[in-house]
Amino acid sequence: MEDTICAVSTAPGAGGIAVIRISGPEAIAICNTIFVPRITGKDLLSQKAYTLRYGSIRRDKELIDDVLVALFRAPHSFTGEDTVEITCHGSVYIQQQIMQLLIESGCRSALPGEYTQRAFMNGKMDLSQAEAVADLIASTSAGQHRLALNQMRGGFSHELKNLREQLLHITSLMELELDFSDHEELEFADRSELSTLATHIETVISRLANSFSVGNAIKNGVPVAIIGETNAGKSTLLNVLLNEDKAIVSDIHGTTRDIIEDTVSLGGITFRFIDTAGIRETHDAIENIGIERTFQKLDQADIVLWMIDAADASLQIAQLSEKILPRSEGKQLILVFNKADLLTDRQFKPTDLPDNVQSIFISAKKREHIDELQDLLIQAAHIPSLSSNDVIVTNIRHYEALTHALDSIHRVQEGLSANLSGDFISQDLRECIFHLSDIVGEVTTDQVLGNIFERFCIGK
Ligand SMILES: Nc1nc2c(c(=O)[nH]1)N(C=O)[C@@H](CNc1ccc(C(=O)N[C@@H](CCC(=O)O)C(=O)O)cc1)CN2
Ligand SMILES: Nc1nc2c(ncn2[C@@H]2O[C@H](COP(=O)(O)OP(=O)(O)OP(=O)(O)O)[C@@H](O)[C@H]2O)c(=O)[nH]1
Ligand SMILES: [K+]
Ligand SMILES: [Mg+2]
């Protein structure tokens, strides 16, 4: 028999009310031993599912708190088990007392993610949905929220189910043909029909795999590298964009050496701003390591903010163009002419720059034209507007499984066009199905499951 588990599901030490969740076969019986109903006779054993009961929690005769108790009966609960929720006052002392009473009466403290893991084990949701629960809790922007909610409600699962059904259909045709391989004239699986189906499946899997770059940008933030010469004002700009004194600013060249990054949401899009070490010739070994990292971050970024001291613009552009322009191909490059407050003549216009490069004059220190820079960033982020039923992959585990599935389906396509024997093709089809099944948790190892759920918070 499963253990009956208990945990405080609300944030520790915060709020006027706290919820303690108890789930498992003994949940109702155990809670019944510590709960005293307001009206005698109205104990938990007789309580209907989806109702609240008012009463108190007592240790022997001593009153601990006035509480409300909600009851769910298996299988109609989040976990699929009998579940009781005790809503008490938010005092940490009260919560500890109730937890202690529950444990003395036969519960055990829940592990991180154990409720969601049980929901998965009891078939309430598949693994991709369970993973979305953690994403939903962590979401801080409209985009993250939308994707996590879609996935939790089974958007991705539905798409994968369709794919697997189609793959199973082809596989069974293929394997039926193998069973009758003595009769060479029998070809149950029409090869051209199979290859049309395989093309369709390939299209869907590629679309899903390709959606990861958007999904990742939404979930982890669009990476924006802030680069340029020392003292251009990169760290000043980072602090302005984050609205926080995150990086040290000083008039000493080479102040920033390590990468400093954080996310902020602008116009519903999460941006990950990355402040870097200023680029200059130096003999300082540590600073040079920092500058190497600057170029790594430049390579990883989707958007590059090249900070230039406007008073020294021609020289700085001449000095760094060769290093920055080739590395920024395929990215959005924005030249940010900073310290415009010190400029008397703003007519300076850079020439000889590629067409896709935009430019803007700002004063990071005086916070001038920051709104316009933010608008440029939102445009440059190129996040396609998503409709509510678009399935977007945000999880690297899913992305990897899709990449493997794509490899398998490519082998199927090659096998079909090379007229390979059915048993080779059906093996690749089986592999493709295996990788898709991994996403929903049907063939997933305990170790992978453990890794996923241990990252959840306690009480979820
Ligand atoms: N108090 C409380 N609030 C909560 C949760 C919770 O566990 N407790 N949740 C925890 O994540 C979320 C809600 N998730 C839930 C999901 C399913 C069921 C449930 O009872 N499902 C039944 C009945 C479905 C129906 O009536 O259609 C079932 O699946 O059979 C309850 C909560 C968010 N808010
Ligand atoms: N007048 C003026 N000064 C600025 C502006 N932005 C930054 N500064 C000053 O320029 C100096 C360098 O700023 P930082 O933000 O440290 O420059 P950085 O590019 O991060 O420099 P490193 O980390 O050394 O590469 C500081 O004294 C800032 O106060 C601006 O818009 N106007
Ligand atoms: K500096
Ligand atoms: Mg700096």
Image: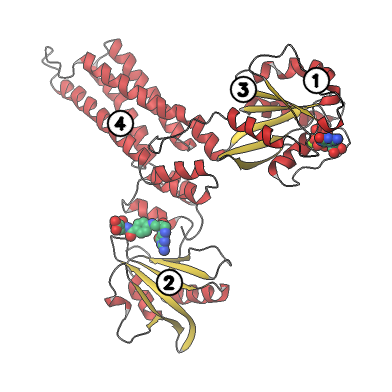
Percent position of residue 330, x then y = 60, 19
Vertical relation: 309 (above or below) 394: above
Dot label at residue 347: 1
Percent position of residue 369, x then y = 73, 34
Vertical relation: 39 (above or below) 5: below
10 Å crowding of disc 4: few (<14), some (14-19), many (20+): many
Q: Nearer the viewer, mark 3 or mark 1?
A: 1
Name which of mark 4 and mark 3 comes first in the sequence: 4
Dot label at residue 86: 2
Q: Nearer the viewer, mark 2 or mark 1?
A: 1
Which quarter holds ligand 2?
top right
Q: Nearer the viewer, mark 4 or mark 3?
A: 3
Which structural element holds mark 2?
strand
Q: Mark 2 near ligand 1 (CB under 8 Å)?
A: no
Which structural element holds mark 1?
loop
Residue under the image location 35 percent in, 22 percent down: 202
Percent position of residue 82, x then y = 32, 65
